[in-house]
Image (cartoon, grey):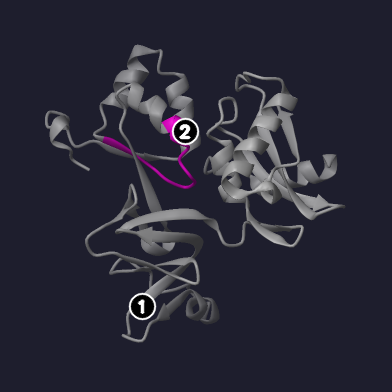
Amino acid sequence: LRPASNAGIPDLYTSLVPAQVATLLDAADDTAVRAALQAYRAILVGGQALPEPLRERAADLGVRLVRTYGSTETSGGCVYDGVPLDTVGVRTVDGELRIAGPMLAEGYLGDGPLTARTFVRDEHGIRWYRTGDLGLVEDGVVRVHGRADNVIVSGGINISLDRVERIVRRIAGLHEAVVVGVEDERWGEASVIVAARGEVLRRSESEQLAHARDAVEDELGKHARPVRLIMVDEIEVLSSGKPDREAIRRMVADLH
């Protein structure tokens, strides 16, 4: 986290979620806000996936973002821009990411069964935390694909909504979009894009949906294409700043 090119910058760090970063970048025309952002050696971003356009916006302003990965069970972030800390081990078992190291929690207070399910030992006696996230490790770099439980079955095929959302968020006007699953009479389940009207759309809503569907099809196949784009005044969020996915899903279900 200390690049030589930033040798003159003091060791200042902060930790934010992507929505907070976006809000600050929107306000960066203010000289004081921009200077405050640039004063950090790095801003650690976690809690949810970091959209690449957001990282690019920050870089254009001289603001360094570092993508972090971890959880309460790992005492916070323990993987930085895909690279685990020196004492951290990451591997996959049946597609699920597992983490080992001295920073793991002892377990869940008063819940032995949950502790036993979540923290497991391998054949060497090493204790691993089952993250519940899908991903892979390539050449020592961790890539997170999304939650194992944030999956729908559409036409008999499993679709990761997190992967669909990452693709959708690369599209101008949909950088803050949320993708949720709803029941579908034809396919069983389908995905829907929800975006705030505050973002500038370069196309009509129907054209924007078509663009998103094409982008998803190119990477994941036709079966993963979202069926609808819903524009709202603002995205509902939790106190943590993360999207309130359950509230958004209920709203979409009522409309769908």
Residue 127 shows which numbered tag?
1
Q: Residue at x 71, y 20 (%)?
A: 204
- Specify few, some or many for label 2: CA neighbours under 10 Å numbering under 14, 14-19, or 20 or more: some
SS category of the residue bearing label 1: strand
Q: Does residue 148 appear left or right of residue 193 in this picture? A: left
Q: Is residue 89 above or below residue 16?
A: below
Region of the chain picked out in magenta, as a range: 42-54
As shown in the figure, which amino acid type bears the numbered disc 2? Answer: Gln
Which x, y percent locates residue 111? 53, 77
Reading the chain from its start, which is encountered first: label 1 or label 2?
2
Residue that numbered label 2 is attached to: 20
Residue sticking out furthest to the right: 185
44 is within the stretch colored magenta: yes
- Give amino acid for label 1: Arg
Classify 119 as above or below 143: below
Q: Which of 169/233 is in front?
A: 169
